[in-house]
Image (cartoon, rainbow, N blue to C red):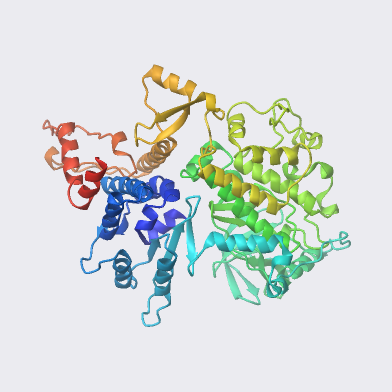
Amino acid sequence: MEITDLIQNYIVFVDTSSWMYPEGTKFLQQEFPAALHSHQKKVRISGKVIEEVNKHIKGDDKKRAEEAKVAAKLLNQYHTHKILDIYQDPDDPFQDQAILAMFMKYRTKFHLAMITQDRNFARDIEDLNEQGSVKSSKIIKVFYLDREGRLQPWVKGVKQHELDRKKRETATNPASRPLKMQENIHRLPLGTKVETGLDTVIPVSYFPKEGESVRTQKYGELTLVKEIGSGGEGSVFLTSNGMICKIYTQITKARIEKLKLMLKIPFEKKGICWPKDFATNSKGEYIGYVMDKAEGKVMQTSMFHKKLLQKNFPHWTRSSLVELAINILDKVLYLHERNIIIGDINPFNIMIKDSNDVYLVDTDSYQIVNYPCPVGTINFTPPETQGMRYHEYLRTFKHEYFAVATLVFMILMPGKTPYAHQGGGTPGEDIKKMEFPYPFGDYRGNAPDGVWRYIWSHFTYALKKRFYQVFSENNRLTTAEWVSVLEEYRRKIKLGHTNDEIWPTSSKIADDDAAHVTCSKCNTPFIMHINKKRDLDADGKSYICNSCLMIMKVTKVAKNEAAAAKQTAPRQRPTMRPATQRPRAMSSTWTPSSTRTTSSTRPASSTRVTPPPRAQQRQKQNNQQSTGLFGIIKKFLGI
């Protein structure tokens, strides 16, 4: 679930185990508070969380004490920025009982969500959904933070990544599957030759249009509510039951036979918009098919440019790009397991709602047995088939693996194709020559200037090696092998062994060039290139870590959007009030207190309101923060 959907629709609780989970600190420092503040929401905690954190700070376990101090700083930050709501029940001596009681109290009124690292507690919360004695349309969801700091759902006390790993293992190693599982997977035979004589057009008396109806065997009669897209093959409509109907401009025998094969396959995979049923006109003539609706934005037009990526996915880091690639390849693996070759892998056929929520569309073009994929894209076509007519040959998995590697490269190098370089020829010519421009080992290459070289320099050695093997030596990895490479890359980012920035501003810093500095915003130590440190020192500027830069970036995006909305809103003549009655403007964005500025507008009246001195405001804020349970934490941390 996307974090914005969760915050907008659920009351979210976080227990002590999550606040003290080291790998979750980044999520709790960046993405979560930024989303809470931008939507003017609060996270809820039990007062027992404060007590438990305080107990660990004073405890003998040094490791737990350090984790508790980090949790205390996080909680204080949330408290300072008014995105934390604390409840306390003196009759509940333990945190778990207090939270369970709260969930029982509100489960019929609100959608509730819990973030916990405790497996048994997660199962207890999930079980509340199945209590037959309480009838409620409200949903309870339970999440945990995984080792990469991502929010993941618990499934009956089992972590989602444990389920995903098991599925990948069984998908890539048939011998390890239980017999029952092997029997349930319907594998199509691989094609041997292109079917011929199937381009005959089948006459159709009428193709329905927007506002009219189509008929399906599974879903009955459906109204074409709205046309949402059109192209050379046909038009796509939103239907009255929320599904999508594709209606062709003409029907051929090949299309009918291919769809029949696709509809026979037992197919259930979220995010792959597979045909669900034929659509016919009022005379029973085939005119198209219905499928599930895809959500999100088209990859090609939403993230393959720096400004587009920052606008559409402002919270993303490099880890998000890696997560996106893994989730796409998970769907490709599902298809490959059934001997289905996509053929036309390209970013126009992928829609993104979030890095964990992606959709593959135009599945009717996939290669099924002897029915080839009739379309393709030059940048995703391997050297050996460049110039060939796509509908005249059957693709192999080796062809597909070239396209998979290209897609991975373009996700990690947002929008840049593998062979694009200075002084190159056409894309097809560069691919045929296999002139991969990025340096590896003794090979220096001719990589594009600027950010592309910086990104490449920050890739791990293993990732560079894999790309070089594919694009320079023509030694292609399987989809499953790419998943393993990406999982290891994600782990290295999480451990801090390589940069998590999408757009680094310099090449990777060697040990001899590394300067250890402290962020002026959050006091977190980090590494900076010695030359950049010297430039900042010479200009009298402070050091800011990536986390704080992210918060500043999100703040700027939100302010720009608010300003744009204000400009487009119809103007109304304001009612003048005395200056003393004017409300103080409040920020609607997540901004560190040290970077906030207060702007005031001079009233039309000659009377001016003199704001209290900044020192007085700061003292008042400190007095407020030093009371109650947070005073305990501040006392022990000396903050």
Q: Position of residue 485 (x, y in %)?
A: 64, 47
State the residue at coordinates (85%, 53%).
393
Quadrant in the rendering for residue 229 = bottom right
Q: Nearer the viewer, residue 280 or 457?
A: 457
State the residue at coordinates (22%, 66%).
89
Q: Position of residue 59 (x, y in %)?
A: 30, 52
Q: Position of residue 448 (x, y in %)?
A: 65, 28
State the residue at coordinates (20%, 41%).
584
Q: Position of residue 302 (x, y in %)?
A: 55, 45
Q: Nearer the viewer, residue 440 or 558?
A: 440
View extreme (front): residue: 60
> How many numbered marks are there?
0
Apparent side of residue 194 relative to residue 5 in the rendered image (left or right): right
Apparent side of residue 67 relative to residue 184 in the rendered image (left or right): left
Residue 619: tell me if it is visible: yes
View extreme (bottom): residue: 133
Apparent side of residue 90 relative to residue 499 in the rendered image (left or right): left
Q: Is residue 152 above or below residue 77?
A: below
View extreme (top): residue: 538
Residue 247: tell me if it is visible: no
Quadrant in the rendering for residue 285 = bottom right
State the residue at coordinates (71%, 26%).
444
Q: Quadrant of the C terminus?
A: top left
